[in-house]
């Protein structure tokens, strides 16, 4: 935990919630992965260049990746 001292926490914004909704609505992620969609959306809205995850079921899934990127860029 001491390694995290001084690292900013990203806020859940209205824009992030809206993007998460779009990720699910447009097929970037399944509805059951709503929390994962919000994780991706928060990182995107805050301009993060990287999202480190070991969630290969949804976030780092090769099947979903292209659609996630497309929706986030739009």
Image (cartoon, helix red, strand yellow):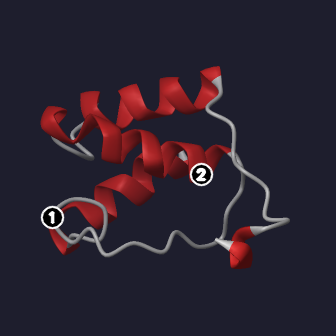
Left or right of 31 in this view: 47: right
The furthest residue to the right = 6
Rounded to the nearest whole Å, what is the CA distance between mark 2 and mark 1? 19 Å
Residue 31 sits above or below residue 43 on the image: above
Please rate how many residues cluster around mark 1, counting C-alpha atoms within 10 Å: few if below 14, some from 14 to 19, many from 20.
few
Residue with the mark numbered 1: 57
- Going 71% across and 79% down the picture, which residue do you hit? 3
| Residue at 79 percent of width and 67 percent of height | 5
Between 27 and 7, which is closer to the camera in this rendering? Answer: 7
- Give the residue pinned by disc 2: 44
In what quadrant of the picture does the N terminus appear?
bottom right
* Residue 53 place in picture, x, y as percent: 39, 72
Is 11 rendered above or below residue 65? above
Number of numbered discs visible in the structure rendering: 2
34 shown above or below 63: above
Q: Tag 2, which secondary structure?
A: helix
Badge 2 density bin: few <14, some 14–19, many ≥20, Cα 10 Å: many
In front of the other: label 2 or label 1?
1
Badge 2 or badge 1: first in the primary sequence: 2
Q: Position of residue 37 (x, y in %)?
A: 36, 43
Residue 43 position in % (x across, y down): 59, 53
Question: Within the image, what quadrant is residue 30 found in?
Answer: top left
Tell me the SS state at disc 1: loop
Mark 2 and mark 1 residues within 8 Å of each other at the beta carbon: no
Q: Quadrant of residue 54?
A: bottom left
């Amino acid at each position: 935990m001491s390694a995290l001292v001084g690292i900013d926490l990203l806020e859940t914004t209205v824009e992030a919630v809206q993007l998460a909704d779009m990720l699910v609505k447009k097929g970037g992620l399944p509805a059951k992965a709503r929390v994962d969609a919000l994780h991706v959306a928060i990182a995107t809205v805050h301009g993060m260049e990287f999202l480190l995850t070991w969630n290969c079921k949804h976030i780092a899934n090769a099947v979903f990746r292209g659609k996630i990127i497309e929706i986030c860029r739009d």
